Amino acid sequence: MKAMNRRRLISVSAVLAVASLTATAVPANAREVGVGSSEIKLGMTLPMTGAASLGYNKIPGAAKAYFDYLNANGGVNGRKITLIVKDDRYVPTEAVAKTNELILKDKVMALLAPLGTANVKAVASSLNPARRGVPVLFVNTGFSGFADVKKYPTTYAILPSYIMEAKIMGEYIKDNFAGKKIGLLYQDDDFGSDALAGFKTAGINFAVKVPYASGSQGAAAAAGWITKFKAAEADVVILFGVSSATSAMLGTAAVLKYAPQWMLGSVGGDATTIKLTGVPAGVLYNAIGFSPVPATTDMNDEYIKLFSDIYAKAVPGSVFDLNVLLGMNTAFMTAQALKAAGQNPTRKSLMAVLNTKGATLANSALTPVGYSAKSHVGLTGYWVGKYSPTGDLLPLGGTYVTYTTDSGTGAVVKSTYKRPAMPAKGLPN
Amino acid sequence: MRLTSAKTRIYALLSASALVTGIIVSVPVAANAAPACDGKSPVQSCVGVTSDGAPYSMMVPANFNGTVALYSHGYRYNIDIPVGIPLIGGYKVTNTPEPIPGGNAAVAQYLFSQGVAVMGSGFARQGWNPDSAIKTNVELIGEFKAKFPTTTKVVAWGSSLGGVITQGLAEKYPNLISAAAPMCMADNIPAELTMAGDFLWGLKVLFDPTIKGGNYSAGAAGNAEAYGDLVKVFTVMGKLQASLSTNAWPDTSSATGKALAAGGVPPRSALLLLGLMSGLPTQSAHFDSIRGPEGALKLSFPLAISPALAILENGTNAAALAVLATQDVELQAGGAIFDNTMTDYAARIENERVIFNAALSGNTVIEALLGALSTANPGAPRAVGNAAAIAKMNALHSNTGKINVPTILMTGVADPITPAGASQRIVDAYAQQFADEKLAAFAAYKTTRSYNGPTNKLLMLWNMTPSKGYTTFTDAGSPITTTPAASGTNHCNFTSAQLVLVAKSLVSAGLTGKLPSGGPIVSAGRKAGNLVVDRNFSVPLLKYYNQ
């Protein structure tokens, strides 16, 4: 008992010690870093230019579109949200440098939606946002490790893990392609490792597995991949890679008239991104795809309807696609969490909200997030669909049937999740 | 001819190294005599020799205000280097005193203008010498006080190994000094030589199995072995630089290396992995791992190539010290001091393999490399140390990180020889010390009802690399390596403004007992150039601590 008290005292004194090391004395009524009298500053790094930016560079504009809408309607407890965006070009060292600027120079309250497993991990190990107490909200990567509260106590996943996705894909394969030869293209890093783990758990045996090193994808490489899939006589080929790999593969396959049943992972299956690489969206036709959020063309969905209206006014002429939806959804969840974090939100109160109420925050996804004090796992499932001739992913049979699972050995089951209704006007209440 | 070619490439790659610095001071004749002063004004110079034979220098301004700054110089090789050795050939062992870092005129001008005297010893022994150097400094302080009885404050500072000596002096003799400033401080010797040993061992088992890498013989034979290793290491680094365009492994590669080459493992990925597992920074003097040339390599250069080039540049800069410091400490310890029989290199790069996955060419290549470097591969035999020698090395002076006097640390975040993690260890230790002191103050309060909490005694100045990147390219897209090393990179690569800021803070802390804090030091750091004060910034410790 005494030992416990001492530990508590040490803990308290350590906090006090750190507090007293601050450069200036902090007045009792001081606001949190990044929280001013009339604004809250958030920071985002992701690829805005260069080869890796296609599609992803719409996320900040989408988030800003929602925040502008929110600000025009009073903001969060009277404070407007300012989103500072920096271009990391998908280079880890640059992500570290830009994130450091956001924390030290721009003094943001929280980091929002950084993109890429390598970048998020580089920032975690180099800048240690956890040690600084900086929330890293809704990271745009499905790497399962970021749900680990012990390793990343201030980081919150949002996408379902790649393991979950592979497990759900695996169940779909077993139900629909029993006895068929299955091929897999995957990125030869943690993205792919998660996928392999998920397929293994699902009990999928591949006729051929083709890894590619990140950055090596292109038409020439794709021709080599196709040779391997052809040699293995794969009936179904899963493309579990980034959009540039998917587009290289589908574009090259169309030229070579190679047409197995395609199955696309959610990361690389966005039609507008693929079109930006010069590959027509028609190559996606009849491919099987997976998504955690409603179809972006589904105007019967109240979230899609409102978000697409807001986006159309903010960024006229820009297609409302998956990246836009995810960007707006992230901003929407952030606004709710900030609102719930109190009149004078702090980094701690913001994370406390996510840990205790995060799973109940309204958002467009068809499965819940799994936030708690013990886990920061993001969304937990997918629905299955097929791509239309225009490249839109639509639910099989016209109805969303959502499957949910975990990143471990849990079963894949149909979800019974009832999504919360959108708050009035899409504003936090 | 091959060597000349490699040497040319290395020279082209390397920036000027600050490994050996010094100012010319005449050497006195009699040991342990009173210092001989020239009596000149406005600054008189005194020279002398301490009882261990170490020459020293004192420089005292006419307006001496009672404060003297004791500077400890960095590592100097303790054997002469033949002229034929690339990069460092022609070096002669010297114990020339260095009372001001690098003889920096701006620092001297500042200190003298404030009435501060300076002094420094050349030390009796070069190489790794904290045990003897701390004693020398203690004696030197006594000599100065005896010669200048109006002395009221002694402040100590030093660079690299001199940082270790300075911190050691503050830990062991806090009553002798009022403030300390270890700059680009080295870690304790086991940690430093683990980094050096891992990298040398990796070069040996992959790229040139004839590299000895340690366990050098005693005497002249050992010197010859070390010279041979220097030539081989520099040659391999030159070949690796060439391999970036050809993708060909060096012709000296081991059977393990050749098998990896046959399996399609790029040599740049192998080199990068060696750097990562050793803990070398992935930013160097000219390679930021951020920028790429315009065109097709705009993204792939920083992702896939620049980190390996940074390791090449950093590794080449560190290689000489790695070989010569290993040989030096082996001589002191009496045998081989590097032992990696239990090292799990896969665990060492758990984070880095994700962050630099593209540059490492993906998990398949990473696994092939880790397999090649594992204990299961007889083609990459692990180095077996001498237990008695290792124990003796571990018994050499070590700093605990205890902060007794106001202390200022300054280090480059991408220093390849004394990684920033060495300073981080002190920062972490002090956080615990401060917490303990706070706890003691609480306990005392219970009985005295008077709370007397500790005051902060540590200021950490991180010398950052430029956040926007700094690699530059020719119109043809080739990286330019002739520009000055970027801020935060290379060894002890500080500007005069940065050194003056430390000097100013050191003298002030010595007089007042308080460190500069708040907005003024943050602003001063920024003005001095890329110095960041952030209590929550942290860098990884040396890999030795994660074994």
Image (cartoon, coloured by chain):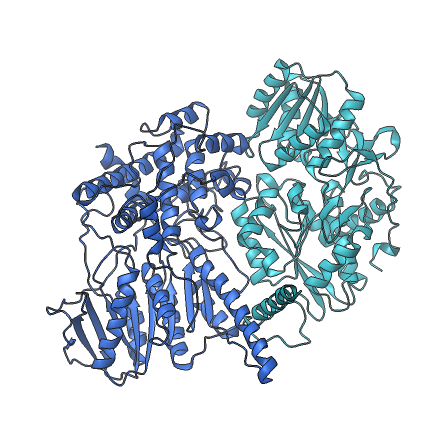
**The C terminus of chain A: image quadrant:** bottom right
How far from the left and from the top, in percent, is residue A292? 78, 39
Residue in the image at 76% along x and 59% along y: A353
Q: Nearer the viewer, residue B50 or B12?
A: B50
Judging depth in this view, the residue of B340 and B227 nearest the camera is B340
User: In the figure, residue B131 lies in which quadrant?
Assistant: bottom left
Residue at figure coordinates x 53%, y 38% from the top left: B357
Residue at image coords 36%, 69%:
B172
Display colour for chain A:
cyan
Left or right? Give the position of B193 relative to A324: left
Residue B277 can be seen in this image: yes
Q: Is residue A3 left or right of residue A78?
A: left
- Res B450 visible: no
- The answer to whether A14 is drawn above or below residue B316 in the figure is below
In this rendering, the count of numbered labels is 0
Determine whether B407 is above or below B338 in the image: below
Query: Which image quarter holds the N terminus of chain A?
Result: bottom right
Residue B160 in the image: x percent, y percent?
A: 34, 59
Q: Residue B106, position in %: x, y?
A: 31, 70
Image spot of residue B273 (x, y percent): 45, 38
| Furthest residue toward front | A1
Q: Is residue B222 left or right of residue A84?
A: left
Choose between A187 and A10: the one closer to the eye.
A10
Q: Describe residue B308's horizontal placement relative to residue A211 as left or right.
A: left
Query: Compared to B198, does B160 lie above or below?
Result: below
Where residue A247 sits, quadrant-wise, is top right
Seen in the picture, residue A341 relative to B245 is either above or below; the reply is below
Q: Which chain does the blue colour mark?
A: B
